[in-house]
Image (tube, coloured by chain):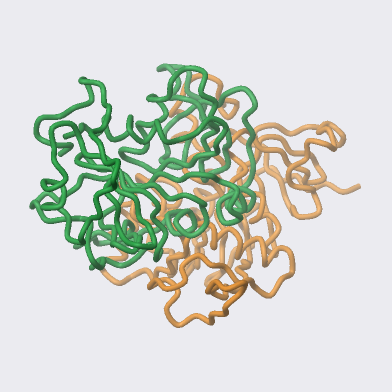
Chain colours: A green, B orange
Amino acid sequence: MLSRHGIAYRVSIDLPEGSYVNLGIGIPNLIGDMLPPGKEIFFHSENGILGMGPAPPAGQEDIDLINAGKQYVTVIPGASFFDHPTSFSMIRGGHIDFCVLGALQVAANGDLANWRTPGEKVPGVGGAMDLAFGVKNIFVTMTHVAKDGSPKILNNCTLPLTAPRCVRRIFTDMALIDVTPDGLVLREVAPGLTPEQVQAKTEPRLTVAADCREMTIPEKYRAARGAG
Amino acid sequence: MIDKTLKTCAEAVSRVFDGATVMLGGFGDPGLPGVLIEALREHGAKDLWVIHNGAGQGDYALAGLMDDGRVRKLTCSFPSHPGNKAFANRYMRGEIELELVPQGTLCERIRAAGAGLGGFFTPTGAGTELAAGKETRMINGREHVFEMPLSADFAFVRAYQGDRLGNLTYRMAMLNFNVPMCTAAKHVVAEIDELVPAGGIDPQQVHTPGIFVDHVVHCARHPVLASKVNLQNPGRA
C-alpha cells in the first residue's frame, strides 16, 4: 500500500517535462514537492496564476498571492498573473495538459463524482466542473476504498457527477488503473499486492495489462495500512 | 476635468438601493473590497442579490452582510468553505436563495454581460445536475449548455493603483473576478491602495481602463484583511 505521499509521488512520475498542470486540493497538492530538481513544469491555479511555486517561508507570505485553495504560495521565474476569464480560457480551451483531482467515486467509463459529498449541508462546485470538462488529461488520486471499506471505483457512480467520461488514469494507494474505451486496465499494483487483491476491492472487472508490474516506490512512501 | 475620486466608501455606496444586484470582487482575500462592503453594511440597503465567488468568511465583510440579514440571494461557485458559517446558517434556514454556478461559467457570464453578449454555449456542466433545465446544443459533436449573461447594478472591487480617471492596476492574484466585474455593472467603484496622478500608470500596465469605472476611493485595506500578513503588504495603513 502507498501513503498519501506515495500516491503523489507516483503521479509526479507521469507528469512530463514542459507540461502545464492544475492540481486539486488534498493529495494532488503534495505533488509539487515530489518533482525531481530540474524537471520544469508550470503549475496553474484557477485564481489567475501560471508558474506557481511552493509555499513561502513563514513571514514571507504576500497578502495578494494565494492559490485556489486560499493558501499562500510563491511564483517561479517566468510566471504570469491574469484574470478569471483568461484563467478559465486556459482550462476550458484545452490549454492545460493535466489536471490531478481528488475523487469520491470513479466509474468504469471514466465518469467522475467529486463535488457533492453525501450529507453535505451546503453544496459547492468551485472550478471542479470546468477542469473536469476542459483539461486534456484528467488524473484522479484517491484511496482505493471508502472509510467503510466499500469500493470507490464502481460500475456506475451513485453520487452526482462532476463530469461524464473524463477520467484518464486513476492513482490509488493500491494501484494505477487506466480508463480505456475497452474498460479499466490495471497497469501497476502497489508493493506487496497482487492483481487479485486489487480486483477484490474494485467493483468493475479489471483487465490486467500484459506488462502489469509492481510500482517502484521509495520505502518512505509506503504505508502498512493504506493511505487512510 | 474628470475626477472620479471620492473621499469615503460611505459616499461610494450611498446609491445602493433595496433589492439591488451587487457584484463583489475578490477571490479569497486578494481583490476583496472589504471596506466598501463594511460601508454597505453601515448603509443599510437590504434584499440584496450578491454575486461573488464564495460566501464570505468569519464575521466581517460579506459574512457580516449575511449575518445582518441583508442578502436575499447569492450567486456563487463555492459557498461551502468551512469558514462560511454566516451563509450556511441563513441558507439552512431557507433565508437565502443560492444560485450555484461553476466558477468558469460564473466569470464568463460576467464577462459576457460586460462585453454586450447575449450569453454563450459551454461544455461545462453538460449532463450534470447544474445543467438541469438549461438549453443544450451539440457543437462539434459535443453537448454544450447555454448560459445567460450576468450583470449587476453595482460592482465593488479592490485594486492596487488607481487614478482620477478610474484606470486601475492589480497586484498578483488580485485580478481574478475584478477585471470582468468592472465591465458588467452600471455603477462600478474601486477601493485602491495607491492614488496616482493621471498618467502615473504606464498605459501598457493598465488592467482596467477607466471607462469601466465610476469612482475610486483611496483607503487602507479592511483591517482584518490587512492584518493577516505582515510583510510585503501594500495595503497596510
Front-most of B96 and B172? Answer: B172
Front-most of B70 and B141? Answer: B141
Relative image position of residue B9 (x, y in whole percent):
61, 47
Q: Does residue B68 appear left or right of residue B82 in this picture?
A: right
Front-most of A95 and B101? Answer: A95
Above or below residue B27? Residue B118 is below
Q: Does residue B65 appear left or right of residue A45 in this picture?
A: left
Q: Does residue A24 appear left or right of residue A82 in this picture?
A: left
Q: Quadrant of the C terminus of chain A?
A: top left
- The residue under the point 74% across, 52% down is B213
Q: Quadrant of the N terminus of chain A?
A: top left
- The extreme front residue here reads A210
Relative image position of residue A4 (x, y in whole percent):
24, 34
Above or below residue B187? Residue A49 is above
Quadrant of residue B194 within the rendered picture: top right
- The extreme right residue here reads B1
- The residue under the point 10% across, 30% down is A224
Relative image position of residue A170 (x, y in whole percent):
32, 48
Front-most of B13 and A223? Answer: A223
All told, the count of numbered labels is 0
Quadrant of residue A64 within the rendered picture: top right
Q: Does residue A117 appear left or right of residue B66 in this picture?
A: left
Relative image position of residue A136 (x, y in whole percent):
52, 52
- The residue under the point 68% across, 75% down is B118
Above or below residue A65? Residue B45 is below
